[in-house]
C-alpha cells in the first residue's frame, strides 16, 4: 500500500469513527537520562551483592574468651613483658597469692609487720621497734606533684626507711643479709624486712623498684637468670616481692661493692642501703661508687645497724651518704624489740 492509499484509508476510518492506531514510540526517548543511569547502576550493585563474600575481622575468637596477665619489667632503656598464659594462673602468681594469709586484695593492704608476724618471722611482735608512721613513708605525690627521673609523666612519690625520706619514681633497696643480721634473736633482720615492706607499700603502680639482698653475693628480686630489672609497683609484682623478702634468710659473709654496683647500674633515683658491717669496701671501690652515683644523679641513703648508744665516728656509710646528697641513720639493734 502506497502513501496515497494509506491517507485515504485513514480518512475512511475517521469518517466511520474508528480511531487510528497509535504511533510506535521509542521508550528510550520517554525516560530521562538520570533514570536510565540509575537503573544501570542498581543492576550492577545487585550483581556484585550476589557474589560478595564477607571477611571476618578481628581475632575471630569468642568475645568472652579468657585473658592472660602481663608482668612488666622495666629498666631505664628497655621494657620487657612476661605473660602468664591464656587466662591461666602461672606457678609464680599462684605461689604469691597462696603464700599470703588472706585474699590478694586484703593482703595487699596488710601492714608489713602483720605480714611478717603471720609468717612466723615476727613471733609475738606487732612492729619492728620504730614508729610506723615514720617507717611507712608518705603515700602519694611529692611536693607539688613534681616529676623526677623515669618517664616525664610519672609523678614522684615520697617513701622512707627508718625515718629517712627519699623522693623519686625509681627506688632500689640494697639490704645486708649476712649471718650477723641473725644476732639478737634475729631482730636486726626482721626489723629491716619490716621497714622494707612498709616502704614498698607506699609506692604506686606507676613507680618502679628493685630489692637486692646481699651477703658474699647479691640476690636481686627476680633472680640472676639475666640482668636485674626494675619492677612496676602494681599488685602482682608487690605480692611476689613480699614473698621474696619474707623467705630471704641471713647467712654468709659481707661483700658490699658488687651489690652496690648492680644497684647503681639500674639508674634509680634513690637507693636505700642498709648494713651492720663495720668493714668498708676498699678506697678504690668507694671512689668508684661515688663517681658512678654522681654521674647518674642517684641519691644514696645509708642505714647502719650497730650496738651501743651512738654511731661510730668516721663511719664510711655516713661519708657515702654525704657524697651522694643522701642521709645517714644509725640504729642501735639492742633497742629493737
Image (cartoon, rainbow, N blue to C red):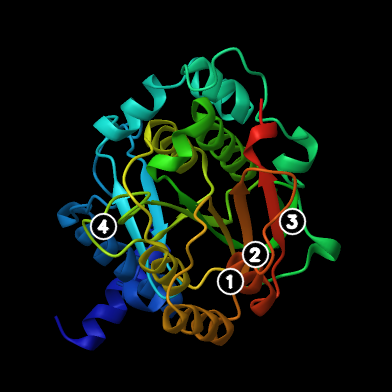
Above/below status of 287 relative to 176: below
The mark lying in front, picked from 4 and 3, is: 3
The label on residue 154 is 2
The residue wearing badge 1 is: 151
Q: Earlier in the sequence, mark 3 or mark 1?
A: 1
The crowd level at tag 3 (other Cα within 10 Å; few <14, some 14-19, many 20+) is many
**Residue at 26% across / 57% down in the picture?**
46
> In what element is the residue under mark 3?
strand
Query: Which is more toward the observer, 317 or 310?
Result: 310
**Residue at 58% across / 84% down in the picture?**
294
**Residue at 32% across / 69% down in the picture?**
41
The reply to whether dot 2 and dot 1 touch (C-beta < 8 Å) is yes
Q: CA distance from mark 4 to mark 1?
A: 56 Å
The crowd level at tag 2 (other Cα within 10 Å; few <14, some 14-19, many 20+) is some
The residue wearing badge 3 is: 165
Query: Which is more toward the observer, 46 or 8?
Result: 46
* Residue 158 lies in quadrant: bottom right
> In what element is the residue under mark 2?
loop
The mark lying in front, picked from 4 and 1, is: 1
Amino acid at each position: 500500500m502506497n502513501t496515497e492509499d494509506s491517507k485515504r484509508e485513514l480518512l475512511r476510518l475517521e469518517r466511520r469513527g474508528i480511531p487510528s492506531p497509535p504511533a510506535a514510540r521509542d521508550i528510550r526517548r520517554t525516560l530521562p537520562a538520570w533514570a536510565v543511569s540509575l537503573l544501570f547502576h542498581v543492576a550492577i550493585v545487585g550483581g556484585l551483592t550476589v557474589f560478595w563474600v564477607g571477611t571476618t575481622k578481628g581475632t575471630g575468637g569468642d568475645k568472652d574468651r579468657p585473658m592472660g596477665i602481663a608482668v612488666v619489667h622495666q629498666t631505664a632503656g628497655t621494657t620487657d613483658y612476661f605473660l602468664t598464659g591464656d587466662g591461666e594462673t602461672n606457678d609464680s602468681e599462684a605461689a604469691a597469692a597462696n603464700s599470703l594469709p588472706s585474699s590478694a586484695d586484703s593482703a595487699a593492704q596488710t601492714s608489713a609487720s602483720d605480714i611478717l608476724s603471720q609468717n612466723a618471722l615476727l613471733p609475738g611482735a606487732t612492729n619492728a621497734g620504730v614508729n610506723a608512721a615514720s617507717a611507712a613513708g608518705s603515700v602519694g605525690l611529692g611536693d607539688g606533684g613534681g616529676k623526677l627521673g623515669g618517664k616525664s609523666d610519672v609523678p614522684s612519690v615520697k617513701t622512707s626507711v627508718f625515718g629517712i625520706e627519699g623522693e623519686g619514681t625509681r627506688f632500689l633497696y640494697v639490704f645486708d643479709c649476712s649471718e650477723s643480721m641473725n644476732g639478737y634473736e634475729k631482730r636486726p633482720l626482721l626489723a629491716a624486712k619490716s621497714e622494707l615492706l612498709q616502704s614498698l607499700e607506699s609506692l604506686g603502680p606507676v613507680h618502679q623498684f628493685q630489692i637486692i639482698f646481699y651477703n658474699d653475693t647479691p640476690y636481686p628480686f627476680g633472680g640472676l637468670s639475666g640482668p636485674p630489672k626494675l619492677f612496676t609497683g602494681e599488685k602482682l609484682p608487690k605480692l611476689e616481692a613480699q614473698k621474696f623478702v619474707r623467705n630471704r634468710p641471713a647467712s654468709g659473709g659481707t661483700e658490699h661493692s658488687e651489690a652496690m654496683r648492680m644497684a647503681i647500674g639500674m639508674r634509680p633515683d634513690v637507693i636505700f642501703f642498709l648494713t651492720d658491717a663495720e668493714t668498708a669496701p676498699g678506697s678504690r671501690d668507694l671512689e668508684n661508687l661515688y663517681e658512678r652515683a654522681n654521674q647518674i644523679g642517684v641519691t644514696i641513703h645509708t642505714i647502719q645497724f650497730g650496738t651501743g648508744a651512738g654511731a661510730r665516728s668516721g663511719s664510711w656509710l655516713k661519708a657515702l651518704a654525704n657524697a651522694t646528697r643522701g642521709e645517714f641513720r644509725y640504729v642501735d639493734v639492742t633497742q629493737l624489740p
